[in-house]
Amino acid sequence: MCDVNENVSFPLFRLKHMKICCIGAGYVGGPTMAMIAKQCPDIPVHVVDLNQERIDAWNSDHLPIYEPGLDEVVKEARGRNLTFSTRVDDAIQEADIIFISVNTPTKTFGIGAGRAANLEFIEKCARQIAKNAKGHKIVVEKSTLPVRTAEAVKRILSSECSGATFDVLSNPEFLAEGTAIDDLLNPDRVLIGGESEDAIETLCSVYARWISREQILTTNLWSSELSKLTANAFLAQRVSSINAMSALCEETGADIDEVARAIGSDSRIGPKFLKASVGFGGSCFQKDILNLVYLCEHFGLREVANYWEQVVVMNDYQKRRFSEDIVKTMFNTVSDKKIGIWGFAFKKDTNDTRESAAIYICRDLLRERARLCIHDPRVPEKQIRQELLLACTDMSGHLTEKDRWLVENNISIANDCYEAADDAHAIAVLTEWDQFKALDFEKVHASMHRPSFLFDGRNLLDQAAMDAIGFEMHSIGKSSNRKNRPSS
Ligand code: NAD
Ligand code: UGA
């Protein structure tokens, strides 16, 4: 292994001619770099990825991800100082600051399977940087990583004898999908962890083009890495907490929205992230908590690991509870009944379906032999079928013939909510798309069987209005229709 001069500081005067590259053109790399390019028109920003199809989409009029406001930001900067390509080696050689924004999914094999983060892609990036770098580079961890990953990154970077020198920073991303552009434009804070003051200042100076200095927090590397996992754990914990209370509301006559309003008015608790739901989804909450659990176990902190694991256990319970409630309410059988599914994305305003609660609810209903007709305004058919096949596949990669048959034959895709509801026994609202609130519900009701069950997994629709039309509506954390459920 060669020595790396980690103390070589990045000369601030080079800022004038600074170049940035980002490895990974996904939900984080794409929007984040587009925002930097928009706000810093003099800094060339090159986003690279191995996936040619994704890069082609970034260079087209049909961006690979749906995010309100993203098209405008990309159009403004692309061709000026924002480039997308698969030329990873070139981008590394040319850049002064290299962001690593690749995926860090849960491991599905070997030690830590189902819990630990798979760091294969991070390591490959670090090796590729080490191989191609010349001069001094600031390497920025943008991906969400286990605490102390920077230590491994530094060792890998120092393993090549290229003469290049490196500073490693941690700069986790806190954007949420669906609101990414606003989150990037007006972040609550930007977090930068590192050891070299010059490197930290260089990265600060990029964000300082549009974010006030008070909102740019600097910490040591490990606090920064751990703060990201902690933030996601706390956010997911709030959702699991309100969902846990929703089950109790249904048994007691309390109303979860009223409880959320009452507790959210306490300024110490605050009103955000208290919306009861069918369960949280998305690519990160579960992955990051499981990673935290794994880390705690690794350090022998069994009680801490158990504490956080309950957030995921509660989320699984909430998803299962919802599909079981549907079956119980519909006279204990949904076999050969059409159920209209409204929404498949993990939240509104995104086309992302990773870990969406809808996947698991649809899988459970399919296994009860329901016929599902799914509509989502942004998710294409191919993606829905792929997600369901994956959800039916066990850890060893085995998919039963029966499950495959069900996904192929008992799933249909509708162009709109009316088609999904037509001739159906029930509707399940699984994503809170705004447009679902503005439908002609008299028309929907008229096209359905009686009783016309409406399971609102997002508490999106007005209960009194739906009751008046004649739906038998079941919401999360409300006991109003419990009396109608047959005992099993
Ligand atoms: P993603 O899967 O959408 O994108 C990752 C991209 O990296 C893929 O396009 C993949 O092809 C590419 N890639 C992987 N290895 C590569 C390599 N060696 N060279 C070039 N490209 C490579 O993932 P994402 O949602 O953008 O998440 C990225 C990271 O950011 C994760 O660690 C995630 O936890 C974190 N994060 C995600 C969000 C979010 O909202 N999605 C928010 C904050 C943080
Ligand atoms: C989340 C965090 O909010 C971001 O700060 C973080 O950067 C990101 O994860 C990440 O690391 O990937 P995201 O998953 O995109 O962002 O979306 P959220 O708005 O957090 O929603 C996550 C899930 O929780 C969704 O399924 C949503 O429907 C659900 N949720 C959220 C609720 O059920 N109730 C709520 O009150 C809030």
Image (spheres, rainbow, N blue to C red):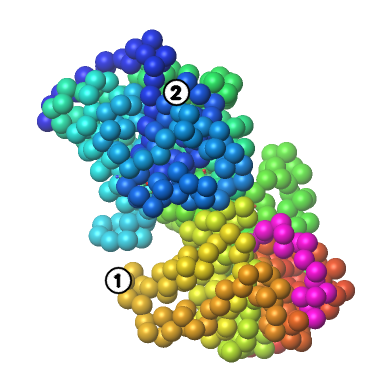
Please tell me whether residue 404 belongs to the stretch shown in magenta: no
**Can see residue 487?**
no
Task: Please give the range of residues in magenta.
Answer: 431-446
Q: Secondary structure at mark 1?
A: loop
Q: Residue at x 87, y 74 (%)?
A: 468
Q: Is residue 437 magenta-colored?
A: yes
Characterize the magenta stretch by its predominant secondary structure: helix
The residue tagged 2 is 43
Lower position in the chain sequence, tag 1 or tag 2: 2
Residue 257, placed above or below residue 423: above
* C-alpha distance separating marks 1 and 2: 46 Å
Position of 250 compared to 350: left or right?
right
Return the x and y of residue 222 as percentages of the image width and height: 38, 33
Q: Residue furthest top?
A: 13
Between 147 and 32, the one nearer to me in the picture = 32
Q: Which of the two marks, 1 or 2, is nearer to us in this view? A: 2
- Give percent across and percent down for residue 139: 33, 29
Q: Look at label 2 and name its amino acid.
A: Ile
Indicate the position of residue 480 as horizontal and vertical percent values: 79, 73
* Left or right of residue 448: residue 299: left
